Amino acid sequence: MKSKNSPFKFVVIITLVVVALIVALVVINNNNSESNVGKTFDKQPSIEGQPTLGDPDAPVTVVEFGDFKCPSCKAWGENVFPQLVSDYVNTGKVKFSFINVLFHGEESKLASLAAESVYKQNPDAYWEFHKALFKAQPSANHDSSWVTTKKILEVASGVSGIDTDKLKSALESNSEMDEVNRDTEMVTDFEVQLTPTIMVNGTMIEDPFDYDAIKKAIENALEEN
């Protein structure tokens, strides 16, 4: 004999199943956000002498380990970086620094030497040159040999405040090689395996394109300060 309450019980069961699914989705989403926060180091990368954007006294430091030959770094700079600057750098909460990575060999080294030389010559021109050099990276066939002294000087000529003759001399003498080598040491010290690698204070972000994970790490760091 069927119970008169069976339809009601069925509705209750369905409701419980739906609630359970919603809870499970929330837990999964939270776990995904947490999983995108990677290894935390006892110290953070030193930005002393590094090109840095934002208030020097900002409580949180975000570092990009990047390679001018890396297409993902170009994409990150175009799609994630502007939001980071708008939300946190311009508001005085974050200072942002770039550390050179030489995963693409001699061209990466030449581009890094150029960037360091520009920074030494005129720090105010660095970020515009940085952006212009990434923009010069070809969208297709990016593995082609495009980083040359000629291309660097061409890019630099379009940035105000850069003496291209001095830049050319600096490239010919490798005058900023010590700065590039210092960056390479940090790449090793912080076990950087891919570019871009983003670190918030001493915490590495698993997926550099997960802006929510970056924001969460920044907000956590702000709470600790």
Image: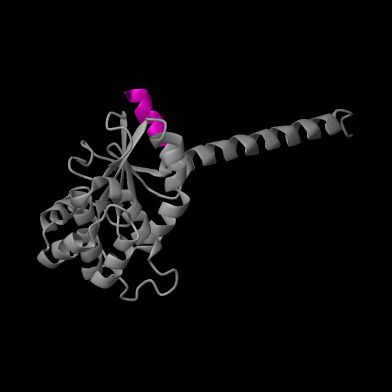
Q: Is residue 130 above or below residue 27?
A: below
At x 45%, y 54%, the residue is 78
At x 70%, y 32%, the residue is 16
Q: Would you identify the image quadrant in which residue 56 lies?
A: top left
In the depicted view, which residue is nearer to us: 13 or 182?
182
In the depicted view, which residue is nearer to us: 178 or 198?
178
Question: Would you say residue 220 sits in the magenta stretch?
Answer: yes
Q: Is residue 90 above or below residue 122?
A: above
In the depicted view, which residue is nearer to us: 167 or 138?
167
Residue 219 appears in view: yes
Question: Would you say residue 27 sits in the magenta stretch?
Answer: no
Image quarter in which the C terminus is found? top left
At x 29%, y 50%, the residue is 125
**How far across and down, in percent of the image, does residue 213 sit?**
44, 41
At x 38%, y 65%, the residue is 136
- Region in magenta: 216-225
Residue 213 appears in view: no
Q: Is residue 167 above or below residue 141?
A: above
**How far across and down, in percent of the image, does residue 74 sit?**
40, 58
Q: Would you identify the image quadrant in which residue 194 lies?
A: bottom left
Image quarter in which the N terminus is found? top right
